Amino acid sequence: MKISEAADRFIFKTRIDLDDEGNYIVLREPTMQQFSQLSDDDKDNKKNIKLLGDMLSSCIVESSFRQEDDTTPATAEQVAKLIRDTASLESEVLNVWSQSIPFGARLQKKRTETVRPPFLLRRGSGRTGRNGGILEQMEEVF
């Protein structure tokens, strides 16, 4: 297998639909170096949220957003800024993203998962996370 194919196959990605009009982002999982900066300590909730927000632009690998010329894709930095400019959208994206990353038993699994943030789901049809920790900390802060 070519290394370019391996990277595409083994790096977990999550597509997050931002609305019902087809706008989305695709985030890859954080690197181990990025992940190791996060803390399991409940006292570090705000620090973890800031770190995840700071990681956002380096983890966005695709989006539906375009430059004003409507042909050139928006940069990851532009999309991250758009998301960070609204606390509700940023908290929702970080929440969904952190829930989707399979921190255990991921071998032989599909590598891209489409998830819809709870604000797009009807009551009672929301997804529950497969892991706690960071997600639970984020819910305490927001």
Image (cartoon, rainbow, N blue to C red):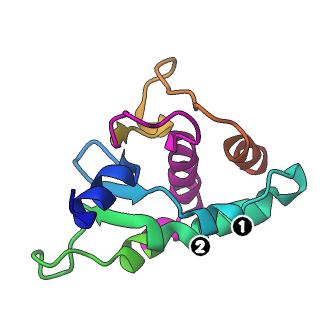
- Element on which disc 1 rests: loop
Residue count near mark 1 (Cα–Cα under 10 Å), binned few <14, some 14–19, many ≥20 = few
Q: Please, is residue 22 above or below residue 90 in the view?
A: above
- Is residue 107 a member of the stretch shown in magenta? yes
- Element on which disc 2 rests: helix
Q: What amino acid type should be assigned to the residue bearing mark 2?
A: Asp
Q: Which residues are magenta?
A: 82-111
Q: Which callout, 2 or 1, points to the residue nearer the camera?
A: 1
Q: Please, is residue 77 above or below residue 3 in the view?
A: below
In the image, taking residue 69 as reference, residue 4 lies left or right, namely right
Q: Which mark is residue 129?
A: none
Assess whether mark 1 and mark 2 are in contact (beta carbons under 8 angstroms). Answer: no
30 vs 70, nearest the viewer = 30
62 vs 24, nearest the viewer = 62
Q: Please, is residue 99 above or below residue 123 in the view?
A: below
Q: What amino acid type should be assigned to the residue bearing mark 1?
A: Gln
- Is residue 90 a member of the stretch shown in magenta? yes
54 vs 112, nearest the viewer = 112
Q: Quadrant of residue 131?
A: top right
Residue at left offset 71%, top offset 49%: 138
105 vs 88, nearest the viewer = 105
User: How many marks do you count on the picture?
Assistant: 2
Return the x and y of residue 84 as percentages of the image width and height.
53, 69
Return the x and y of residue 73 as percentages of the image width and height.
20, 74
Quarter holding the N terminus? bottom left
Q: Which mark is residue 37?
A: 1
